[in-house]
Image (spheres, rainbow, N blue to C red):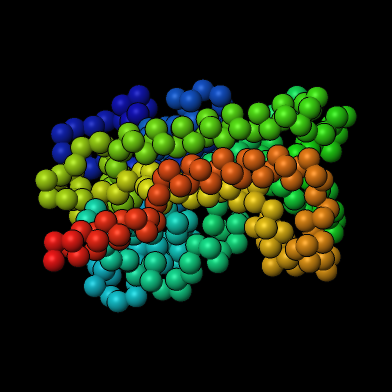
Amino acid sequence: MMIKNNRRLTVGDHIPYVICEPLETDVASNDSKKASKTSSERARHPDEIARSGGVLKPDVAWYLTQQFLPPVSRLCEPIVGLSQGLIAQRLGLNASKYTQRRSFGDGEMNDDELVNYVPESFKKDKERFGDVKKLSLTCSACGVGSDFPGLLYLRKENDTDAGTLSGGFQCVNPNCQHPQYWGESTPFACMARIMNSMSMLMRERLQSYYEGVVKCDDPACGLETRQLSVNGGVCLNRGCNGRMTSMVSEHAVQTQLKYFECLFDVGHVTKQLVDNKQNFGSSQKDLASMIARTDKMMAGELCRISKEHIDECSYNWIAPSFWQQVFGGIQTKQ
């Protein structure tokens, strides 16, 4: 770029550069090549930035992530109670992307998981299922695609609206002319569409899990591969001190399956509304009575299917027969 601008260069010259933010025209463009420029393609000479009149701006987030966070994290690693996620949060970055994950073969929980630990079953659905892939449906009547809101949810037209309780088997588009059963003629057709969407999401999640892709937890490296080091979870890049972690873990698969169950579990849905104090003083029994009989039957069948998938997964669950086989065999030998 300097040569194109008729700048004289010789061997050994110092070339300054600054990594700039993507231009608005590049981000808004549909061309994926422009929208996904690498850091080297976004490098500019300081003089060019000064002449741009504010169009070219240094990418502060890139420098914090790539140049500042990794060395500070390594220096502060011996400090008890301080983690990479906490440092990233103090820098104004998304802490969830830099939280140290559990390494292969490490059965202990890290500091981020131990401090203020809350069991998954005690978390709100918004927090517990924030990272799962949402169940999305397209209304056959209006053609608008939306996330399935759940069996019973609080529908708000705007931020100031108190909201009204609505059933999840209706299109969420307020302008839809036939919202019942997402535009389908019968409830069975609606249930079949939801079952197909659930199956597709499950297969996609399981396929991602069985691909076995691991990623380095060091943001400065970010290596993604299917290869594993003979030394366990050590990063394959020479000189990197990061640890390789699964892109899709067993816990993520379990959370995805549990998300489907909680969408159609009448008891869970009503309990969430009561705990969030968004039920206008109604109890779980009163809220359950607001659900139509057909909707309950559909939800019961969908919830049953979701539980079957969870039972097949058997994550974090040991069947009682296992202990009978182990200790029963010992008694037989004795």
Residue most extreme to the bottom: 80
With respect to residue 88, does 24 lie above or below?
Answer: above
Front-most of 310 and 142? 310
* Quadrant showing the N terminus: top left
Q: Quadrant of residue 182?
A: top right
Using the rendered image of the protein, determine whether residue 158 is visible from the camera's viewpoint. no
Horizontal side, residue 329 vs residue 162: left or right = left
Q: Quadrant of residue 67?
A: bottom left
The structure residue drawn at horizontal position 56% and vertical position 26%, both measured from the top left corner, is 29
The structure residue drawn at horizontal position 20% and vertical position 37%, both measured from the top left corner, is 227
With respect to residue 304, does 330 lie above or below?
Answer: below
* Quadrant showing the C terminus: bottom left
The structure residue drawn at horizontal position 82% and vertical position 45%, both measured from the top left corner, is 292
Give percent across and percent down for residue 251.
Answer: 41, 51
Q: Quadrant of residue 76?
A: bottom left
The structure residue drawn at horizontal position 48% and vertical position 50%, both measured from the top left corner, is 255
Horizontal side, residue 171 vs residue 36: left or right = right
With respect to residue 288, does 296 lie above or below?
Answer: above
Give percent across and percent down for residue 280.
Answer: 84, 65
